[in-house]
Image: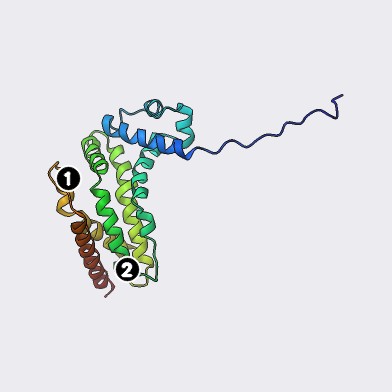
């Protein structure tokens, strides 16, 4: 018969996943994807470079696709694109677009982001799967943010198809010559004043596009 004083062990909840380790994994994975490409980068390589176990990598990211998406999304988070694109009826649409444009131009001017674009372009013909991952996690996600803004802001409230059209036009305006030059490894840097001017012009032109679509 079991003793009444037998100690009953209580299960303790697992330790929360370390945000620091996740950041460490993302940074290492980003460097490996750039230096080796998506196809030649393995989860084992990421674990070794991050100084964690492969099990730890999988505890944060279920597979390599998820890790690749997270690497791209982490850049958008670093530049606060989701935060500044939130619809705020107390702010003018132009003001929101100008702030978003400023941050997005800085994102596209980031040396690591430029390297990501070039790496994907280099792999696209042989690994279309990688191109699709990049396109969905980067351009498509950003377009969806602005599309939602155009659907919900009191100054626009466009129906979905028109909102998407206007969002695509906005991002095409944001790229321009500096982005093309950066992909061709030509001098492209914009100073703060030039970025602010471009952000203002893109926002102004986009508001005019939206007014035209609302007629």
* Label 1 sits on residue: 182
Mark 1 surroundings within 10 Å by alpha-carbon count, few (fewer than 14), some (14 through 19), many (20 or more) = many
Q: Secondary structure at mark 1?
A: helix
Residue 23 vs residue 107: left or right?
Answer: right
The residue under the point 36% across, 66% down is 151
Cα distance in 3D space between marks 1 and 2: 29 Å
Observer-nearest of 92 and 196: 196
Which corner quadrant holds the N terminus?
top right
Circle nearer the N terminus (1, 2): 2
Q: Position of residue 3 (x, y in %)?
A: 85, 26
Observer-nearest of 119 and 49: 49
Residue 60 vs residue 186: left or right?
Answer: right
Q: Position of residue 215 (x, y in %)?
A: 26, 75
* Label 2 sits on residue: 93
Q: Position of residue 69 (x, y in %)?
A: 37, 41
In the rendered view, tell whether residue 7 sits above or below residue 190: above
Query: According to the image, what is the colour scheme of the structure?
Result: rainbow
Q: Secondary structure at mark 2?
A: helix
Q: Is residue 61 visible?
A: no
| Quadrant assignment, res 156 | bottom left
The residue under the point 21% across, 66% down is 205
| Quadrant assignment, res 161 | bottom left
Residue 113 vs residue 12: left or right?
Answer: left
Residue that lies at the very extreme toward the right in this rendered image? 1
Mark 2 surroundings within 10 Å by alpha-carbon count, few (fewer than 14), some (14 through 19), many (20 or more) = many
Residue that lies at the very extreme toward the left in this rendered image? 186
In the rendered view, tell whether residue 96 sits above or below residue 214: above
């Amino acid at each position: 018969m079991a003793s009444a004083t037998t100690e009953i062990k209580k299960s303790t909840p697992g330790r929360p996943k370390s945000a620091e380790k996740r950041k460490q994994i993302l940074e290492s994975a980003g460097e490996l994807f750039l230096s080796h490409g998506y196809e030649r980068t393995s989860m084992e390589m990421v674990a070794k470079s991050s100084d964690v176990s492969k099990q730890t990598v999988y505890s944060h990211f279920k597979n390599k696709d998820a890790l690749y998406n997270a690497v791209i999304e982490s850049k958008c988070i670093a530049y606060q694109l989701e935060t500044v694109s939130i619809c705020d009826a107390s702010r003018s649409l132009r003001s929101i677009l100008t702030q978003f444009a400023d941050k997005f131009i800085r994102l596209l001017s980031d040396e690591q982001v430029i390297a990501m674009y070039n790496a994907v372009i280099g792999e696209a013909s042989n690994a279309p799967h990688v191109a699709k991952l990049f396109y969905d996690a980067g351009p498509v996600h950003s377009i969806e943010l602005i599309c939602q803004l155009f659907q919900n802001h009191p100054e626009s409230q466009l129906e979905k198809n028109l909102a998407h059209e206007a969002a695509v036009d906005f991002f095409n305006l944001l790229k321009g010559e500096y982005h093309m030059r950066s992909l061709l490894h030509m001098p492209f840097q914009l100073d703060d004043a030039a970025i602010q001017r471009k952000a203002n012009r893109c926002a102004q032109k986009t508001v005019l596009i939206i007014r035209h679509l609302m007629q």
